[in-house]
Structures are given as C-alpha cells and as structure tokens.
Image (tube, rainbow, N blue to C red):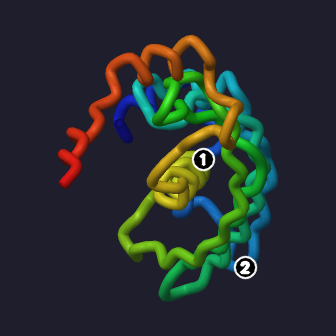
C-alpha cells in the first residue's frame, strides 16, 4: 500500500523531505477529504473529512512528530453494509528513525485513523437499511425451543 500511495499524485504535498529541512519546529495543517480516501482503494475507510495538524521537531540527532487527526470518516456498517459516519479525534507522538529521508504525513494520519476505529461499526438501533435488516431476520438462527416438562 505504501508504494501505491507514493505514486498517487495527491500525496505529494504531504511528503516531507526530512533531509532538506532546517533544524527546528515545522508545522503542517491540511485536510484529507473524500477524494483522498477514495484514491486509497480497498481500505476500511470509504471517505471522510478529517483535519490533520502535525508538528515536526527536527533535531541534530533525531526527529519527532506529534500528529492530531479530527473529523469524520465513512465506514461500512457491519450489520447492514451501508456507509455510516465514524468520528475521529486522535493524537500520537512518533519518533522518526535517523536514516529516514522522507516522511508521508498523510499516510501516518491514515494509519492513526485506521488503528483507532472501533472494532465494530454499527448504525444506532433503528438506523440500518430496513431491507437488509428484513433479509437478516429471514436468515436468523434461533435456538430450538426447549420442551415443556
């Protein structure tokens, strides 16, 4: 997936050439939108609108990144398979290896979103696609009734 992203034209603005930065603090603010998420293809995230705030601290010996992502992403409901919104509000500190020459901040933001999504995605009760719920009810397994004594 990483190689695919590097070839996408819309990731270029989010790739920072670490070996070309001056020492000190560098701040990056950008938005990952539906178009960006859809270009990923075959991921759990179908779309969304997220704001990314990243602070890169470049030192002589090492670099560190504090990244915060907030907004909403779309995922498939596990019950009815229709898109649903999931709120994202995550922050992380990342140490960057000395030998790294570049850093794809958008990809790091995506990974932060993906690992912080809930394990189960379901619409609130009553909000699922009624046709799919009806189909599920037809195929629902029920425990056999116990005989009366």
Q: Residue at x 58, y 77 (%)?
A: 93
Which of pointers 1 and 2 lies earlier in the amino acid sequence?
Answer: 2
Q: Which residue is drawn at 66% across and 66% down?
A: 90
Q: Where is residue 115 in the image (x, y as percent from the top left)?
A: 47, 58
Quadrant for residue 125, please give it.
Answer: top right
Asked if residue 73 can be seen in this view, the reply is no
Q: Where is residue 54 in the image (x, y as percent from the top left)?
A: 72, 64
Q: Position of residue 46 (x, y in %)?
A: 57, 28
Residue tagged 1? 106
Q: Where is residue 55 in the image (x, y as percent from the top left)?
A: 73, 70
Front: mark 1 or 2: 1
Residue closer to the observer: 81 or 53: 81
| Residue 70 located left or right of residue 130 | right
Determine whether 91 is above or below 148 in the image: below
Q: Which residue is drawn at 49% across and 88% down?
A: 61
Residue neighbourhood size for the residue with mark 1, other residues' Cα within 10 Å, grouped as few (<14), some (14–19), many (≥20): many
Quadrant for residue 97, please give it.
Answer: bottom left
Q: In which quarter of the image is the C terminus?
A: bottom left
SS for callout 2? strand
Determine whether 61 is above or below 95 in the image: below
Q: How far apart are marks 1 and 2 (CA)?
A: 21 Å
Residue tagged 2? 24
Q: Quadrant of the N terminus?
A: top left
Residue neighbourhood size for the residue with mark 2, other residues' Cα within 10 Å, grouped as few (<14), some (14–19), many (≥20): few
Asked if residue 118 can be seen in this view, the reply is yes
């Amino acid at each position: 997936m990483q190689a695919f992203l590097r070839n996408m034209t819309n990731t270029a603005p989010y790739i920072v050439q670490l070996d070309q930065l001056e020492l000190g603090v560098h701040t990056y603010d950008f938005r990952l939108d539906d178009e960006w998420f859809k270009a990923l293809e075959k991921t759990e995230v179908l779309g969304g609108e997220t704001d990314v705030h990243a602070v890169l601290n470049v030192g002589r010996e090492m670099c560190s990144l504090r990244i915060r992502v907030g907004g909403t992403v779309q995922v498939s409901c596990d019950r009815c398979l229709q898109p649903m919104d999931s709120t994202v509000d995550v922050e992380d500190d990342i140490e960057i290896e000395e030998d790294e020459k570049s850093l794809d901040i958008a990809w790091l933001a995506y990974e932060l979103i993906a690992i912080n999504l809930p394990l189960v995605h379901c619409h609130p009760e009553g909000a699922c696609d009624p046709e799919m719920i009806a189909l599920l009810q037809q195929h629902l397994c029920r425990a056999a009734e116990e005989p009366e004594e």
